Each structure stands twice: as C-alpha cells, then as structure tokens.
C-alpha cells in the first residue's frame, strides 16, 4: 500500500485486516466468446447447462444479499432491474435491505467482522471511506467489467457505449474500479430557457469572451448574471471547479502533467497555473458585479429560487435541480444548461463535471459464484430499459451515450438532464469527475480546504485577491502531503 494512502478510520481498517484471512480464494474467470464473465465447470458445463450470455450455470441457485441505499432516486428502478434479471436468469434471487441509512448498517457489519453476514453487494457510502476497505482486500475489483459486452449493446463493450469521458474519469482506488457506475449527474450553470429566449441571450457561448458578454448583457437588464449558495461555497465549483483546470491545462498544452499532479497530490495544487487562472477569472467577474452582493447569506434552495423567480439568470448547480425544486417551479419554466468555456477559440474542448456513480460494491470474501452473478447484475443495470427507468423514475443521467438515439426513450429524460445531453451534442465536451488516486488525512489538509472555502464568497464579490489565499492553502497542503509521505 502506498504511503500516501492513509486509513480514514483506523478502527475500520483494523477490522478489515482481521477479516482478510477469511477471504475465499479466487477462481479463474475465463471469458466466454460472447463477452461473458466466465465459463462454468463440472457437470453443468458438461451437460450444457450454462447461459450462453455469460457462461454461468443454470442449475445452481444463488441468492444475492443486497444492501440498497434508498435515496431521492427511490427504489422503483432497482426493483424493475431485479425483476427483469430474475426473468432472464430464474436461478438467481435477491434478498434486499432497503434503507436511507444503509451506510450505518454496512459499518455495523464491517465492525462485526462476519463475512457470512455481510451483503454480497451494496450501494451507498462506506463509513471510514473506500480506501481502507480496499487496502484490506475486502472489496472485489470491477475494472474488468468495462470490457464486458453490454447485454443489449450490439456487441459493444461498456467502455465503448459509455458517455464520452466517463470511463477515464470514473472513480477508482489505486487504478481500479470498485463500484461500476450505473447513473450520473452533471453540473454547470442552470437557467430558464424561456427567459433567455425572451431576452435574446446567448444560450450556448462558445468562448470565454462570449460568456463574459452574456454576463454583461444580463447585468444590463438589471438581473443577476450568476448566483450560488454562499452558505455552501462549494456549489460555485459546479460551474468553475477543477474541470475548468483540466480545460485550461489542455488549452495550455499541459494536460498530462497537470492531471498527474492533481490525481496524485503532487505540488503545485492551489498554486498550479491553471488553478490561479480560474480563481483570477472568478475574481475579475466579481469586480464586474456578476455575482449577487448577498451571496454569503444564501443557501442552495434560495439561490435556485432566485432563478425560478427571474431575479438571477443562472445558478451554479446540477442536473438534479429539477427534482429538488419541482414543488416551486412555475409551469412555464424550462430548464437549460451551459458550461463555462475557458478558451478564446470556438470549438475547443469544454470540460464538464460528471458524477458517475450509484454503483454497487461487491464483498470479496463471498463465494465465487455469488460474486460472478453480482457482477452480471451490475452489467445488467446498463441495459437500456433499466437506464430508461433510472432516467424516468430516478431523475438521473443515463450512463450510455446511445441512450438518446431513440426519441421515445430520450423523452423520458427530465428537462434538466436532457438540457445537458443537448449541450453535449452541440459542443465538444469532455466529462470529468475530479477524482483523486490518493487521499490525505492529516489535519492540515482540512485546514487547507477551510482556508479556501472561507474565501470563496469574497473572491466572487471581487473583494479578495485570490493569490494570498492560494498561497496560504498551498502551504497547509504541503504539510499534509509531507505528513502522508512519512
């Protein structure tokens, strides 16, 4: 384990290490010719009693114990997925625990140290973080699933049908995927399309200069160009976050070096040229009055209400905003989406935030056949009918780039995520999650973040030069990185 990876919870990590000896051995997973996970052995294979889609035995009953995080997406889409999976593979059944606090249940099971009682697969967060559990060898890697052929992908792999940038930016630990994403959200600047049409405003600025002109046009009408919740300053990152640093790095021809530094916590970070540039741009916008004076007092619903009420033109938020504000949204309102272009050259790549997740972890110390079927189910969640349920009932972004090829299917996507999809069609977009390969646990790391968060609103109002803040944050981060290396 790298010295840079520190256990977020020593108690959890010790419990994990104590369980390692109980882990089952791994069998050889041979891929079937049609892209299946592996061939069965023994009597089932000899008698031809295997599914041609994946090479798994038909005559061995398997019950998968599932821990389901019951969130704003609801459970209807997941129940549908399980029902359709059982129809296709009747020897597989599910036992599900639904809970909005599934992470607490998972933490209790981890602490108990009983592999047999643990879920075969589960969603939600892991108390103490993913890293210590991976370090203890208790989660099954799922990186191989990206090369699996989709059940309805016309022979294409998940990697091939994934949204552009999704595979590259999928969250990983030490280079491996441990929860294959099955849904996503995106973020940027959300606005009312009808308001933009009425005022003749540019809904799709192609350059930084066009974007600034849009802000000036909006301000000239006595309307706030961009709002965000100052109580939760991280919301500004949805439009101006690390994805803009990636974009600037590509413009500067420095993408490879920047990405290596960023992913692996190599200095510079706060003082990286790309980070200095993005904060200077926010600072200059603030001096021009493009953010509301009272932004520090706003929470996220209040800032979004400013757009619904026509007091602000755009809000830094995400495609989930439609579900979140559905009770307050006027009937005539129609959500639009744009990203902030950093280049002065039309047609340049625009980096957009993607949070691709909602995946299921698989417990490594489970019978091999259970793990194989759990992986099959994770692949099944990429089926277009399941993705339609995720979009329609869950209000999330589908993970497949061919999803909107069918107009009927595309109509199931809510207006806000659909606007993001439309934006991708008319711009050269790269999706980026902003994941890190390593984590820092030294208190100086949190102090560094605190310094930045406390300065965001003042920078956005043009009242705080970002450079001194970035220098202070960098010094604290340097301490955290040095502590991790010891």
Image: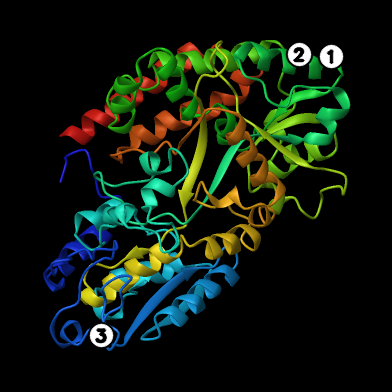
Circle 2 Cα neighbour tier, 10 Å, few/some/many (<14 / 14–19 / ≥20): some
Query: Residue 257, relative to residue 318: is it above or below?
Result: above
Q: Nearer the viewer, mark 3 or mark 2?
A: 3
How far, Cα to Cα, is label 3 from label 2?
A: 68 Å
Q: Are marks 3 and 1 in contact (CB under 8 Å)?
A: no
Query: Residue 326, relative to residue 65: is it above or below?
Result: above
Residue closest to the eye, 25 or 82: 82
User: Could you tell whether 196 is left or right of 46 in the image?
Assistant: right
User: Could you tell whether 56 is left or right of 353 in the image?
Assistant: left
How far, Cα to Cα, is label 3 from label 1?
A: 72 Å
Q: Can you identify the residue that label 3 sits on?
A: 49
Task: Report the quarter where the C terminus lies.
Answer: top left
User: Could you tell whether 443 is left or right of 75 in the image?
Assistant: left
Residue closest to the eye, 472 or 257: 257
Residue at 34% over, 74% down: 119
Residue at 34% over, 55% down: 128
Q: Are marks 2 and 1 in contact (CB under 8 Å)?
A: yes
Q: What secondary structure is marked by label 1?
A: helix
Residue 220: assigned label = 1
The first of marks 3 and 1 along the sequence is 3
Residue 63 locus on image (x, y percent):
35, 84
Residue 317 locus on image (x, y percent):
64, 38
The first of marks 3 and 2 along the sequence is 3
Residue at 71% over, 22% down: 291
Q: Can you identify the residue that label 2 sits on?
A: 216
Residue 445 showing in the rendered view: yes
């Amino acid at each position: 384990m790298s010295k840079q990876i520190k256990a977020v919870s020593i108690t959890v990590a010790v419990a994990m290490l104590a369980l390692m000896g109980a882990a089952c051995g791994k069998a050889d997973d041979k891929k079937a010719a049609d892209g299946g996970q592996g061939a069965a052995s023994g009597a089932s294979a000899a008698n031809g009693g295997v599914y041609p889609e994946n090479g798994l035995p038909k005559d061995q009953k398997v019950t998968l114990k599932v821990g389901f995080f019951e969130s704003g997406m609801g459970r209807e889409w997941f129940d549908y997925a399980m029902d359709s999976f059982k129809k296709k593979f009747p020897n597989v059944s599910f036992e599900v625990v639904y809970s909005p606090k599934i992470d607490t249940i998972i933490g209790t099971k981890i602490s108990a140290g009983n592999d047999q009682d643990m879920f075969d697969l589960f969603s939600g967060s892991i108390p103490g973080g993913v890293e210590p559990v991976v370090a203890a060898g208790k989660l099954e890697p799922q990186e191989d699933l990206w090369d699996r052929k989709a059940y309805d992908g016309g022979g294409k792999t998940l990697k091939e049908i994934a949204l552009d940038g999704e595979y590259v930016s999928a969250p990983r630990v030490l280079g491996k995927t441990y929860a294959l994403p099955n849904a996503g959200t995106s973020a940027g600047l959300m606005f009312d399309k009808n308001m933009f049409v009425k005022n003749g405003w540019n809904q799709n600025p192609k350059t930084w200069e066009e974007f600034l002109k849009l802000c000036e046009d909006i301000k000239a009408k006595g309307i706030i160009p961009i709002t965000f919740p100052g109580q939760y300053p991280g919301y500004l990152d949805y439009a101006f976050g690390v994805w803009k640093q990636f974009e600037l790095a590509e413009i500067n021809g420095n993408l490879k070096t920047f990405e290596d530094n960023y992913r692996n916590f190599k200095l510079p970070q706060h003082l990286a040229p790309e980070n200095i540039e993005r904060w200077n741009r926010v600072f200059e916008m603030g001096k021009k009055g493009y953010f509301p004076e009272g932004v520090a007092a706003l929470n996220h619903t209040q800032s979004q209400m400013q757009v619904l009420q026509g007091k602000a033109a755009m809000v830094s938020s995400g495609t989930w905003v439609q579900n979140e504000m559905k009770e307050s949204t006027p009937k005539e309102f129609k959500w639009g989406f744009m990203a902030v272009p950093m280049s002065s050259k039309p047609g340049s790549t625009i980096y957009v935030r993607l949070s691709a997740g909602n995946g299921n972890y698989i417990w490594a110390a489970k019978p091999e056949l259970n793990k194989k079927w759990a992986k099959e189910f994770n692949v099944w969640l990429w089926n277009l009918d399941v993705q339609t349920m995720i979009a329609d009932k869950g209000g999330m972004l589908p993970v497949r780039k061919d999803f909107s090829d069918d107009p009927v299917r595309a109509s199931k996507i809510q207006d806000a995520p659909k606007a993001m999809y439309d934006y991708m069609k008319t711009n050269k977009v790269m999706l980026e999650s902003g994941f890190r390969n390593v984590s820092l646990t030294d208190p100086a790391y949190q102090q560094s973040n605190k310094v930045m968060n406390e300065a965001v609103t003042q920078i956005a109002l043009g009242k705080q030069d970002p450079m001194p803040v970035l220098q202070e944050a960098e010094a604290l981060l340097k301490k955290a990185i040095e502590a991790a290396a010891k």
